[in-house]
Image (tube, helix red, strand yellow):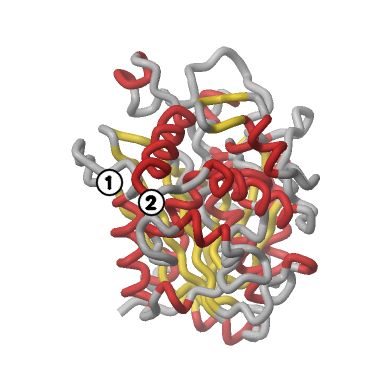
Amino acid sequence: MSETVFIAGVGMTPFGKFPKKSLRSFGREAAVEALTDAGVSPKDVGLLACGSARTGIYQGRESGVGQLIGWEVGIREIPVYNVKNYCASGATAFNVAWLGVASGEHDVALAVGLEKMSTRSGHSRPLTADGMELEGDLGFTPPAYYAMVARRHMQDYGTTREQIASVAVKNRRAARSNPRAQYRDEISLKDVLRAKPVASPLTLLDCCPTGDGAAAAVLVSGKVAARLGRQRLVRVAASVLRSGCYDQVKDMTVFDLDVRASRLAYEKAGIGPDEIDLAEVHDAFTIGELVHYEDLGFCAKGDGGQLIADGVTEIGGRLPVNPSGGLLTKGHPLGATGVAQIFELVSQLRGDAGDRQVLGARVGLAQVSGGFLEGDFATSGITILTR
């Protein structure tokens, strides 16, 4: 039986384009904030897990990012795990930290996710290069893939272009109250529909931005939780990471990997989708959020467009989704995203989210997908937190 794991502290830098800031400065800022928030010192940390997807290509640092951040904050002589797992790199680091504490091997673990994408140390391959050599040569890009998903969803379920665009409007409205979000000005449906075309029917405002940033979380055992006092602690009810089945014959409007990973997470947490109070999902593209509604069991298949049209996923609705602003607005520094989702959930469950607070929130879910391989997503991370 695994040990109960709690999140004692979280930290996060603002997301955006900061060309003059270094990778190490982002990691240091987020880690120090998380350690301070938790009330633990660097010498208390028994394991450090660091997620970054593109530090090799963008910053010329293939290895040792976790050691670099540990050195910056005074962490030494402990196991450091560096993980690169596409957009799910941060979620993977969190899962490694959770495993370290849940196994009973460590009492305190630090998970860090970070990325610097606004500048590059030299020439690089396209962002979609990993695992996509053939498809990339043939023109595969994530915007094109999600555009096909959007068209298929519209054709099969009657989802409207306005429903898809309203995801961007909703998330930008939420980010207005998030001081760490990359974009905070509100936009309208007309703004989204008339923005620069990217891959029909998606425009620029249907797509997440690139940027820089870091996030961190301190995970502790029940023994340490008792010492710290539990008023500010959040319990990790489930942390699930799964890879794809790589089935070439699939419905483009279903992300089967997320379906399977979320059902396992619900089983481990002992709760169902109807008990989720808020969610942070991988809205790299507007249509993605609608599909996640369905795959996570928040509504029936094909009803994602109607769910947002009815205001269910707004702050103040029955099930707010991406109250942080999501990847579309908060930003998507790849390796940082998974831990940044945890930052938002912890803030909400503690009642610390200010004007974007989800009232009465007790159970939160984070979902992040990562990469493509053989026509399927390469990985999926699902985390369920409770108070």
Rendered location of residue 266, percent (x, y): 36, 72
Rendered location of residue 14, percent (x, y): 75, 47
- Depth check, front residue: 302 or 24: 302
Rendered location of residue 64, percent (x, y): 52, 37
Q: Earlier in the sequence, mark 1 or mark 2?
A: 1
Residue 214 visible, this angle: yes
- Depth check, front residue: 95 or 103: 95
Q: Secondary structure at mark 2?
A: strand
Q: Secondary structure at mark 1?
A: loop
Q: Horizontal placement of 64 versus 33: left or right?
A: left
Residue 27 visible, this angle: no
Q: Horizontal placement of 317 versus 154: left or right?
A: right
Distance in Å between CA atoms under marks 1 and 2: 8 Å
- Which amino acid lies under the numbered mark 2 shown in the image of this protein? Ser
- Which amino acid lies under the numbered mark 1 shown in the image of this protein? Gly
Neighbour class for label 2 at 10 Å: few (<14), some, many (≥20)? many
Specify the quadrant of the image occupied by residue 140.
Answer: top left
**Label number found at residue 244:** 1
- Depth check, front residue: 221 or 185: 185
Rendered location of residue 86, percent (x, y): 44, 39
| Quarter occupied by the C terminus | bottom right
The residue depicted at 75 percent of the width and 44 percent of the height is 187
Identify the residue position indicated by label 2 in the image.
Answer: 380
Q: Contact, CB < 8 Å: mark 1 with mark 2?
A: yes
Compared with 181, 233 (above or below) is: below
Specify the quadrant of the image occupied by residue 342.
Answer: bottom right
The residue depicted at 54 percent of the width and 28 percent of the height is 61
The residue depicted at 40 percent of the width and 59 percent of the height is 294
